[in-house]
Structures are given as C-alpha cells and as structure tokens.
Amino acid sequence: MFMTAIVLLGLLFLAVGGAFFVKSAQANPIMNVYRDVSPPEGAQPPIITIYTPINSSVCPNDVKLTFYVTASKTRGDEAIDAITKIYYKASWETSTVTVAEKRSGSFSIDLSDVQGGDLSVKIYAVGVGYIQTGEDFCEEDDLVWSYIYYDRFEMRGYSTVSFTKDPIPPYAPAFPVTPVVASIATVAIVSLGFLLYFKKRKNVFIKLFPHGAHVTLAFVKNKFSI
C-alpha cells in the first residue's frame, strides 16, 4: 500500500513537472504595435550622393546614372533604421520609376536609350525610424503575449542633377585635311618651277589663261607641243 502511494505521487509529480516544462518551452508570442507620428526634432532624411553624370556637364550617349544611398548618421530616437524605397522622377519619363525597395547602397542605371538633349533627374529615398514607447503583457490560452509599442516616422530625401546628353556623335571629316593642303602646296611649287624653267628658254612661249580651271600649254617652236 505504501509503495503504491509512492508510485502514484511520483507519476503525479512527473505529470505536473512535464506540463510545466512544456509550457515553459513554448515561445511566448510578440506583437509589435505601431503608431505613425511626425519625425522627431533632429531627425535627418536619407542621403543620396550622385556620382555621374556631373551637374551641368555634357555627356556622351552611353552615360550612366550612378549614385549611392545611405541612412543619415544620427543616433538614438532620431535615427533612420531602414531605407524602404528608392525611386526617381526624370524629365524623359511620364511617371516615377522605382529603383529598389528595402535596400540601400550603390546603384547604376544605363541612360544610353534616352534621347539626347537637356535632361534632369531627381532621385528620392524614403527612410523609416522606430521609437519604442512601451511594453505590455497579456496571458491568453496558457500563453503570455508580449505587446511592444512603437512610434513610427518616415523621412524622404532627394538629390537632383541636370545635364546635357549629346545627341550627335563626334564629327569625323570625310577626308584628311592636312594631306590635301600639302598636295596643293606641292603642285603650286612644281608649277612655279616649270614656269621658271620655260622662261629661261628662248624658243618657248608661255600662254597664261584667266583665272579658273584651265590647262596651261607651253609651245616650243618647230619641234613639239604639249
């Protein structure tokens, strides 16, 4: 009888202890509760640094739009915790264009298909910050729920660049200018040499024609003509 009581007490202890350990091992759910507020004083928007094209520059046809996006360097409640969206509005687009969501860093956009001329683009980055304001607990269905309360704020930064994209490729002359000039000078020198030579000879007549595209003829008496 005594042994039976001991066995029953042991089983009861194991049952209660097992239920306790099972309940302790269960993860207590956490519920985040957000309230949208205005940015706190001192908060800074995301930073957009445009590398190319350079503002007010003239760019070739294969120009790329390259830039870097990062959160501001503020700390504490004024800090931006994440970049949620990056997009741009360009003079050659009819609506905004999304570049990325939930990421930051370096970006490169090929503009070779954009028509040339005077262009401009404004790049936007949206950042979000969270400020914890409280915490609460509630037991339900043998679980302890944790409620964490946050104030959430958003800030938008932007950067603009204006530039000219050259619509015409660099001009290449159809023929080399320098060799042609040199050839004309050579012909003139040779012609002058012939003129002086024939003037020294008594049996040669020189006939000059008016300005224009003519052939100059030299006549040699009683011998031959050219």
Image (cartoon, helix red, strand yellow):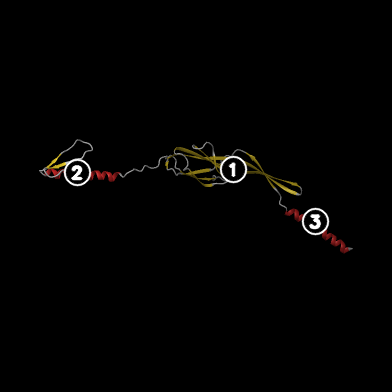
**Circle 3: residue type:** Val
* Residues under numbered marks 2 and 1 in contact, where contact means CB atoms less than 8 Å apart: no
Q: Residue 108: x percent and y percent?
A: 50, 46
Direction from residue 85 to residue 138 in the image, left or right: right
CB atoms of marks 3 and 1 within 8 Å = no
Mark 2 is surrounded, within 10 Å at the Cα level, by few (under 14), some (14 to 19) or many (20 or more) other residues, namely few
State the mark number for residue 128.
1
The CA span between labels 3 and 1 is: 47 Å
Can residue 188 be seen at all in this image of the molecule?
yes
Q: Quadrant of residue 102?
A: top right
Circle 2: element type: helix
* Image spot of residue 16 (x, y percent): 80, 56
Which residue position holds label 2?
Answer: 191
Q: How packed is label 3: few (under 14 Cα within 10 Å), some, or many (20 or more)? A: few
Residue at image mark 3: 16
- Which amino acid is tagged 1? Val
Q: Of tags 2 and 1, which is closer to the observer? A: 2
Quadrant including the C terminus:
top left
- Residue visible at 87% across and 64% down? 3
Q: Residue furthest bottom?
A: 3
| Amino acid on which the number 2 mark rests in the picture | Ser
| Residue farthest toward the right in the current orientation of the protein | 1
Q: Which mark is on residue 48? A: none
**Marks 2 and 1, the one that precedes in the sequence:** 1
Q: Earlier in the sequence, mark 3 or mark 2?
A: 3
Residue 204, position as x, y percentages in the image: 12, 42
Q: Residues within 10 Å of mark 1 (few under 14, many from 20)?
A: many
Tell me where residue 148 appears, x and y as whole percent. Answer: 67, 45
Disc 3 to disc 2, C-alpha distance: 124 Å
Q: Earlier in the sequence, mark 3 or mark 1?
A: 3
